Image (cartoon, grey):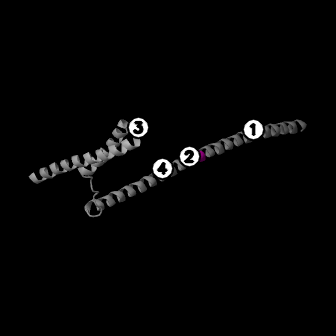
Amino acid sequence: MKTILSVLFGVFILSSCNSSSNNDAALKEKQRTVDSMQAIITKQAVIDSMRNVAAEKEEKNKIEEDNNKQAVANSNVVQESPQAAPRKKKWNNAAKGAVIGAGSGAIAGALIGKHDRAKGALVGSIVGGGVGVGTGLVADGVKKKKNRGN
C-alpha cells in the first residue's frame, strides 16, 4: 500500500510540475498575444495620424482652391467692367523730357561748376529741364501727326 501511495504521490507531483510548465507556456503565449495586439494598436495609431494629416492637407488644398476660384471670379468681374478700374494716365513726352533733362542738367552742372557746385547744379537743372521740355514737345507733335495719319 505504501508503494502504491508513493507512486500516486510521485505521479501527482510530476503532473503538477508539468502543469506549471504548461501554465508558463500559456502565460508566454498570452504575453505574445498582448504584445502583438499592442503592436497592431501602435500601427493603427500611426495610420490614423497619417490619415488625419492627409485629411488636413486635403482640406487646406480645398480651401486654397476655393480661394483661387473666388479670386478668378473676382478678377473676371473686374475684367468684364472696364470702368471699375480707371486707367492710369501715362506721362507725355514733354513731362518725361523735363524730368530727364533736369536730372542730367543738374549732374552736368555740378560737375562743370568750378567754384560753387550747388549753383552749377541749379543752373544745369533749369537749362536741362527747358531743353527736355522742348524735346518732349517735339516728340509729342510727331506722335500726334502719326496718329492723325492712321
| Numbered range of the magenta stretch | 40-46
Judge depth for marks 2 and 4 and give the one in front: 4
Measured along the vertical axis of the image, is residue 72 above or below residue 107? below
Judge depth for marks 4 and 3 and give the one in front: 3
Kind of residue at badge 1: Ser
Q: Earlier in the sequence, mark 1 or mark 4?
A: 1
Q: Is residue 97 left or right of residue 10?
A: left
Q: Residue furthest front?
A: 115
Closer to the camera in the image, 71 or 38: 71
Kind of residue at badge 2: Val
Judge depth for marks 1 and 4 and give the one in front: 4
Q: Residue at x 87, y 37 (%)?
A: 6
Q: Which residue is mark 2?
A: 46
Q: Residue at x 38, y 36 (%)?
A: 114
Q: Secondary structure at mark 3?
A: loop
Measured along the vertical axis of the image, is residue 136 above or below residue 11? below
State the CA–CA distance, disc 4 to disc 3.
Answer: 75 Å
Q: Secondary structure at mark 4?
A: helix
